[in-house]
Image (cartoon, rainbow, N blue to C red):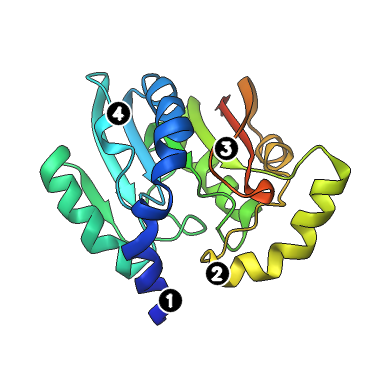
Amino acid sequence: MGAWNRVFAAMYDRVTAGSERDCFSGHRRTLLAQAGGDVLEIGGGTGANLPMYGEAVRTLTVTEPETPMLGRLQRRIGELRPGTELRQASAEQLPFADGSFDTAVSTLVLCTVDDQPRALRELHRVLRPGGRLLFMEHVRSDERGLARWQDRIAPLNRRLLCGCRCNRETLAGIEGAGFDVTELERDTVAHAPPFLRPLIVGVARA
């Protein structure tokens, strides 16, 4: 666990406050209104999604791989959604049986996982047939010039943004993992540098 990871966890909410207020929170609210049944959220971070889950959620399980985030996340769970199960686990190796969940949630996570195809296969595996993946993710720009900039800056992003690879073609990755994308919205992240602005929000069915 590096010192920068601890600093990043402590600063995350403050650094992203503007984007959260003017972009992310609206998408979270709309997207997570569709969560129901037994729900798995990967990469829970500082718990921004916790207040957005509704009464249709029967059980909520949240994973988070980073130790510095776990303490903050545990406190927020106690404040906002007691009874949530918190597990330290990577998205690439989920400690759950096949077909354990009705809904999986990934918000601003698939850009940071080490092995995105493996993480998506794991999400597909733990969902029941017909289960849904709700996603909101940084992605590669459709604008050629900006995409080249994302490629050039990617190595620096990985070090300074704790693994963020915002140049990934995540939509193609979701489809390649066997999901059928049923809803999709593209947006631009407010208060973010250009290389972090392209965003997709949607629903995919296993």
The disc placed on residue 160 is 2
| Residue under the image location 36 percent in, 20 percent down | 33
- Which of the pair 178/7 is nearer the observer? 7
Crowdedness near tag 4: few (<14), some (14–19) or many (≥20) residues, C-alpha within 10 Å: some
Query: Label 1 sits on what residue type?
Result: Trp
Q: Is residue 16 above or below residue 55?
A: below
Q: Earlier in the sequence, mark 4 or mark 1?
A: 1
Crowdedness near tag 1: few (<14), some (14–19) or many (≥20) residues, C-alpha within 10 Å: some
Q: Earlier in the sequence, mark 3 or mark 2?
A: 2
Query: Label 2 sits on what residue type?
Result: Leu
Q: Position of residue 108 (x, y in %)?
A: 51, 46
| Residue under the image location 63 percent in, 48 percent down | 196
Q: Where is residue 128 in the image (x, y as percent from the top left)?
A: 45, 30
Judging by the rendered image, the residue that carries numbered circle 1 is 4
Q: Is residue 109 above or below residue 157?
A: above
Judging by the rendered image, the residue that carries numbered circle 4 is 52
User: Which type of secondary structure does the marked residue at label 1 adopt?
Assistant: helix
